[in-house]
Image: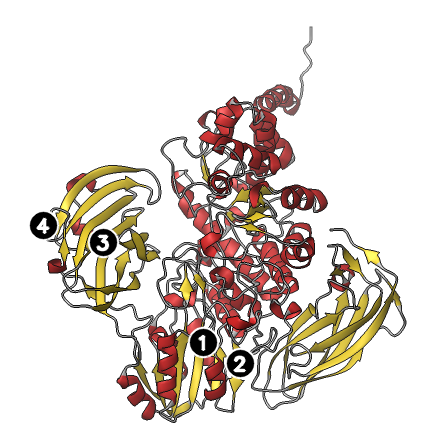
């Protein structure tokens, strides 16, 4: 009997097919990259026990070893650069808004995503995810900067919903990338919604706001980032809105976000916002009820704690709610499917070779291209507020007096919610590089904002039992979480380095040290008192209240001080808290100095001997920011009570101006300043913001004329708080350029140049249009000056006389570059939502009637060059919310 020979390939195939089929059968669906992310996520979730499921509902999501699910901390920040050391740091968002350049903001966000991926890979080398090492970035902040007193307004894109939406969409698109399968990173627009101060009441305030103001002002940017940019997540806020906390707010989460906007991503809470529901808003009777209600209303991940947790306290309320029968497993599943869908889209469950973003070259971190964009954006953010011809300065032969402590500091340039670049250019460094042939003299001029100090001596410190020095307690654990005591020791003072670690605390990280005791001054007076440290966090408390704090970058020595009155011989209770998360150089030093805010005569002398004075003055994110321990006149808890320059700086400005030399004021700030005196007396004023790592270069290049300024104000500069409604009132009447009827110091959209521009030949539809038809506006812009430069063409729309309509509204902008004498014709396409307004009842409509259009370098009737026209719409069209 003859046996037929089979080809070897068929024999192998016969063997491999059943083997492959068996392998596919064994592979769980959630590990199959060919399936839809939602299907994979659902498969994974359904394999979990209830306790495993609830352990995923907080930012410190636990590992599930039996399913090979690694732990993951969802808390990462990237407001204007990844919040890590060794990254590129771009201008603060309010400065980015001043560029009116959403294309470069989108490019910046992509670079941030790239650096975030590199940092994520670095952090995951041990297989675990720590805080700030994830790929879910809680940015951008697209709250509306409705009131300049709000300390966190610096984090936003200003006061206008349209500009904020365009910047927000650009950021989200850039950060999330354009791959059809995988996210570069996930962007989280925040804080949803109607959230913009005061900081002192944000955990319990119930904001009353009309539907008109919600749909007209507070929600449009969120809607755009969700419906247009497809943001992967959204963060809900602390405050209540019309009686319901934001993270359980039916109108915001269900009616708008997941209903009318069809949001498919996940919602993360602001940190402690779910605890606020029960503890502060008293909206539920128990924490378990608050946690359950948040999940049921659409919140998926709760930010609870900073860093790794040792027990189950953070997710226990969800498990309690399940056991009490007030939270269904199916409701938990809904949240988890959203969360794991996000992780699938980040490529966390796929082989690295399948994920295009896993191949990023680590050399792109702080690359020359990224740093160059930081400089370009800083240059574009510069807003020239006043110039009598003093600027630009000639490059050689000048004697320049640089006055103000901020001129030599770099910390202020980075704003808040920032990472730390390897090198930041101070204003003084920038000026010396840009004016190499000038004679530059520097004087701080005032101790206000000066952070110098000497170590507090042992003789001024005593322990509770009267011994010299302080008690030092060492522990391990999270700075704001549970700590495990290690040992205690007697310290002569706070001047701590690695050599001072006791054996019992050696190698234990995170390491915390707390010095406590009493401070006694030998002289009565006002003091600067604070900490100089290298690590991750440092706080000085006096009589149980924080006086100074600094979130440290782990790579640079940083300083924070507050001001306090001390009486000779009178003891005050003092506590210094210091933390470092991992092995490395350590330093903590308690410092002080006598505080005298009056102008230093040396600054006046320098001004008299100079050809021109450059005064670098303003405020910093150590004065304005998030829930801050600030004890300065004009500030409260991170917010501002005055819009004026702080008095010591105003006195310094007046004293150096009296020297009779030209004065150029360079402003440092993240919010509007009422520099009324300076507008009358200074020769030039440059708005410098918090301009990022290349800020000193940008300011110097603008003063020299190498950079022709074209930034525009994204916020109104009022003459003072008397022009504003109460801070606690969230109604938009009388606020921002759209509803303010007074005369501001500088209007929204304002900014000068070293050249001039003209606008002509505005072309608009001549025949009436039907509601819903698009409108095209075309205009020609000419550089009529002698130097090349950028111009920001702004289109403002005024609506038919219908209740609810703003005075005018920005509905288009273009940043263009023109050589001297050059012209360019630009076109604006206005679609449905661009043409719409919100009526008094809260309905978005395209109204019937006559519309006025103004296109120019600023708002109409503000001195900016403009050209105007009108068009007609017949019929009315209601738009979807």
Disc nearest the viewer among 1 and 4: 4
Q: Which residue is mark 1?
A: 667
Q: Position of residue 564 (x, y in %)?
A: 27, 64
Q: Residue furthest right?
A: 767
The image quadrant of residue 696 is bottom left
Kindly give the residue lying farthest to the top in the view shown: 1
Disc on the earlier residue, 2 or 3: 2
| Camera-side residue of 391 and 275 | 275
Task: Give the CA distance from mark 2 to mark 3.
Answer: 44 Å
2 or 4: tag closer to the N-terminus: 2
Label 3 element class:
strand
Examine the image and state in which quarter residue 601 appears.
bottom left
Q: Which mark is residue 467?
A: 4
Mark 1 and 4 residues: CB-CB less than 8 Å, in contact?
Answer: no
Callout in the foreground (3, 1): 3
Closer to the eye: label 2 or 3: 3
Quarter of the image where the N terminus is located: top right
Residue 206 seen in render: yes
Q: Give the quarter of the image for residue 650.
A: bottom left
Q: Residues within 10 Å of mark 4 (few under 14, many from 20)?
A: few
**Badges 2 and 3: C-beta atoms under 8 Å apart?**
no
Q: Secondary structure at mark 2?
A: strand
Crowding at dot 1, Cα within 10 Å, few <14 / some 14-19 / many 20+, comes out as many
Dot 1 or dot 4, earlier in sequence = 4
Q: Nearer the viewer, mark 2 or mark 4?
A: 4
Q: Are marks 4 and 3 in contact (CB under 8 Å)?
A: no
Residue carrying label 3 = 574
Give the percent coordinates (x, y) of residue 32. 60, 31
Say which mark, if any, is on residue 385: 2
């Amino acid at each position: 009997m003859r046996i037929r020979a089979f080809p070897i390939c068929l024999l192998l195939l016969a063997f491999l097919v059943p083997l492959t089929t068996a392998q596919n059968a064994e592979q769980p669906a959630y590990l199959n990259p060919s399936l839809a992310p939602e299907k994979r996520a659902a498969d994974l979730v359904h394999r979990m026990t209830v306790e495993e499921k609830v352990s995923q509902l907080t930012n410190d999501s636990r590992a599930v070893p039996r399913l090979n699910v690694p732990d993951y901390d969802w808390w990462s920040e990237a407001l204007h650069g990844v919040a890590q050391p060794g990254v590129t740091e771009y201008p603060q968002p309010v400065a980015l808004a001043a560029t009116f350049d959403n294309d470069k903001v989108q490019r910046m966000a992509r670079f941030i995503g790239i650096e975030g991926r590199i940092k994520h890979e670095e952090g995951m080398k041990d297989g675990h995810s720590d805080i700030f090492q994830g790929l879910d970035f809680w940015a951008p902040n697209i709250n509306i900067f409705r009131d300049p007193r709000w300390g966190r307004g610096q984090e936003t894109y200003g006061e206008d919903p349209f500009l904020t939406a365009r910047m927000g969409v650009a950021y989200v698109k850039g950060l999330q990338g354009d791959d059809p399968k995988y996210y570069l990173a996930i962007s989280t627009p925040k804080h949803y919604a109607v959230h913009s101060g005061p900081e002192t009441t944000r955990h319990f305030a119930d904001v009353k706001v009309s539907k008109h103001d919600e749909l007209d002002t507070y929600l449009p940017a969120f809607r755009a980032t969700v419906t247009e940019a497809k943001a992967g997540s959204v963060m809900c806020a602390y405050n209540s809105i019309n009686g319901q906390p934001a993270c359980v707010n039916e109108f915001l989460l269900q009616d708008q976000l997941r209903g009318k906007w069809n949001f498919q991503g996940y919602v993360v809470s602001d940190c402690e916002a779910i605890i606020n529901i029960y503890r502060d808003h008293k909206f539920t009777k128990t924490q378990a009820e608050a946690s359950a209600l948040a999940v049921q209303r659409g919140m998926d991940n709760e930010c609870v704690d900073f860093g790794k947790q040792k027990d189950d306290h953070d997710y226990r309320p969800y498990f309690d709610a399940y056991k009490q029968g007030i939270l269904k497993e199916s409701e938990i599943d809904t949240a988890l499917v959203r969360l794991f869908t996000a992780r699938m889209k980040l490529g966390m469950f796929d082989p690295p070779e399948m994920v295009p973003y896993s191949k990023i070259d680590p050399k792109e971190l702080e690359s020359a291209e990224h740093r160059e964009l930081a400089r370009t954006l800083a240059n574009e953010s510069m807003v020239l507020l006043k110039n009598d011809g003093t600027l630009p300065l000639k490059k050689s032969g000048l004697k320049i007096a640089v006055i103000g402590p901020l001129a030599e500091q770099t910390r202020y340039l980075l704003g808040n919610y920032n990472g730390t670049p390897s090198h930041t250019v101070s204003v003084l460094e920038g000026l010396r590089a840009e004016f190499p042939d000038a004679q530059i003299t520097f004087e701080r001029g005032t101790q206000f904002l000066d952070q110098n100090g000497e170590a507090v001596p042992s003789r001024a410190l005593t322990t509770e039992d009267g011994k010299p020095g302080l008690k030092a307690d060492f522990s391990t654990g999270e700075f704001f979480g549970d700590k495990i005591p290690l040992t205690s020791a007697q310290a002569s003072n706070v001047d701590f380095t690695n050599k001072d670690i006791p054996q019992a605390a050696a190698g234990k990280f995170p390491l915390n040290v707390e010095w406590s005791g009493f401070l006694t001054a030998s002289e009565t007076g006002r003091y600067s008192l604070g900490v100089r440290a290298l690590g991750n966090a440092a706080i000085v408390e006096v009589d149980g209240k924080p006086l100074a704090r600094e979130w440290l970058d782990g790579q640079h020595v940083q300083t924070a001080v507050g001001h306090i009155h001390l009486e000779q011989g009178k003891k005050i209770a003092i506590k210094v808290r210091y933390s470092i998360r991992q092995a490395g150089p350590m330093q903590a030093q308690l410092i002080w100095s006598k505080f005298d805010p009056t102008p230093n005569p040396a600054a006046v002398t320098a001004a008299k001997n100079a050809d021109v004075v450059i005064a670098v003055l303003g405020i910093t994110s150590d004065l304005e920011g998030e829930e801050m321990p600030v004890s300065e006149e004009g500030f409260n808890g991170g917010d501002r009570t005055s819009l004026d320059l702080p008095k010591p700086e105003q006195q310094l400005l007046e004293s150096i101006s009296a020297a009779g030399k030209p004065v150029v004021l360079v402003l440092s700030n993240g919010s509007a300043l009422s520099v009324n005196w300076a507008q009358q007396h200074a020769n030039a004023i440059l708005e410098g913001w918090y301009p990022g790592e290349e800020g000193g270069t940008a300011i110097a290049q603008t003063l020299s004329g190498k950079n022709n300024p074209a930034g525009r104000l994204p916020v109104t500069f009022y003459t003072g708080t008397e022009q504003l409604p109460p801070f606690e009132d969230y109604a938009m009447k009388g606020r921002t350029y759209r509803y303010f009827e007074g005369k501001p110091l500088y209007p929204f959209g304002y900014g000068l140049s070293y050249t001039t521009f003209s606008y002509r030949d505005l072309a608009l539809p001549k025949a009436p249009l039907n509601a819903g038809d698009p409108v095209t506006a075309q205009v020609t812009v000419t550089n009529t000056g002698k130097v090349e430069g950028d111009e920001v063409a702004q289109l403002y729309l005024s609506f038919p006389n219908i209740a609810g309509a703003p005075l005018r509204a920005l509905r288009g902008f273009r940043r263009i570059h023109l050589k001297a004498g050059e012209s360019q014709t630009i076109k604006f396409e206005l679609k449905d939502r661009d043409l719409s307004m919100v009526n008094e009842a809260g309905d978005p409509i395209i109204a019937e009637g006559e519309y006025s259009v103004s296109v120019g370098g600023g708002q109409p009737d503000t001195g900016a060059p403009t050209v105007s026209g009108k068009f007609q719409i017949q019929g009315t069209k209601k738009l979807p919310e």
